Image (cartoon, rainbow, N blue to C red):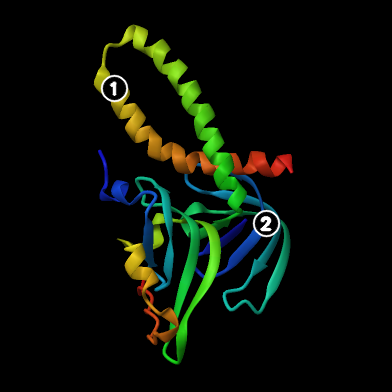
Amino acid sequence: MLVELKNGETYNGHLVTCDSWMNINLREVICTSKDGDRFWRLPECYIRGSMIKYLRIPDEIFDMVKEDIVVNKARGRTDNQKNRGGSRGARQGFGGRGGGGNNRGTGQQQRGGPKSFRGK
Amino acid sequence: MSSGLESYVNHTVSIITSDGRNFVGTLKGFDQTINIILDDSHERVYSPNQGVEQIILGLHLIRGDNVAIIGEVDETMDSSIDLSAIRAEPIGSVVF
């Protein structure tokens, strides 16, 4: 995947890990300067999430994330059922689903990334 | 709690980032920091002496910090625009 930083530099490499701050670990990286006239090859690098402007991701990842969401929803349902035994809070369940949904969207995409790359 | 963006999901949106670039694509997701997932996206590059250049980008995740404006695109109206005839100065970037 390609990472463009706020300073205009781009980093092209394989995603290894990332976290919920979007901090990113890349391997086999090609760094390109802001003007695109200079290049560096780095065996690995770590990018602080707050420096990122955007990520360009292979299209396949999107389908993999969709599958992941289905799997996790199924898992979540069983978890909810366990929880429901104890608490009668309809609101609790609702909030969890709504709020968690969005987080899950991006979180999973990132989490899905490294697994998929390892697979290849 | 739902942000206004919820209604844009799976619709074509146009995003202007703080560096003055314009991305157009299908909004697939967002989170509380306005990180944006754009599918089938392209960048529109405006210039004063030639038509709008469209650069195909595919799947894009834009970090919320850089998002300045998000707008829903009326697809029928958008497709009726002759981009090659548009001459425009590119938007400047936000000065930090």
Q: Name above or below for residue A99 compared with residue B9.
A: above
Name the residue rendered at 55%, 67% in the picture.
B56
Of marks 2 and 1, which one's residue comes earlier in the chain?
Answer: 2
Indicate the quadrant containing the N terminus of chain B: top left, top right, bottom left or bottom right.
top left
Q: Is residue A85 left or right of residue A20?
A: left
Count of marks placed on residues: 2
Q: Name above or below for residue B17 compared with residue B53.
A: above
| Camera sees residue B63 | yes
Indicate the quadrant containing the C terminus of chain B: top left, top right, bottom left or bottom right.
bottom left
Kind of residue at badge 2: Gly
Query: Can you identify the residue that label 1 sits on?
Result: A92
Q: Residue B12: x, y in percent? A: 38, 58
Tell me the element at label 1: helix
Q: Residue A7: x, y in percent? A: 50, 69
The numbered disc on residue B20 is none
Tell me the element at label 2: strand
Name the residue rendered at 36%, 63% in the picture.
B75
Name the residue rendered at 38%, 86% in the picture.
B89
Give the alpha-carbon distance from disc 2 to disc 1, as whole Å: 41 Å
* In the foreground, B11 or A72: B11
Q: Residue A10: x, y in percent? A: 59, 66
Crowd around label 2: few <14 · some 14–19 · many ≥20 (10 Å): many
User: Chain ID for label 2?
Assistant: A
* In the foreground, B16 or A27: B16
Kind of residue at badge 1: Gln
Q: Residue B36: x, y in percent? A: 42, 53
Crowd around label 1: few <14 · some 14–19 · many ≥20 (10 Å): few
Q: In this view, does B48 lie to the left or right of A18?
A: left
Query: Can you identify the residue that label 2 sits on?
Result: A13
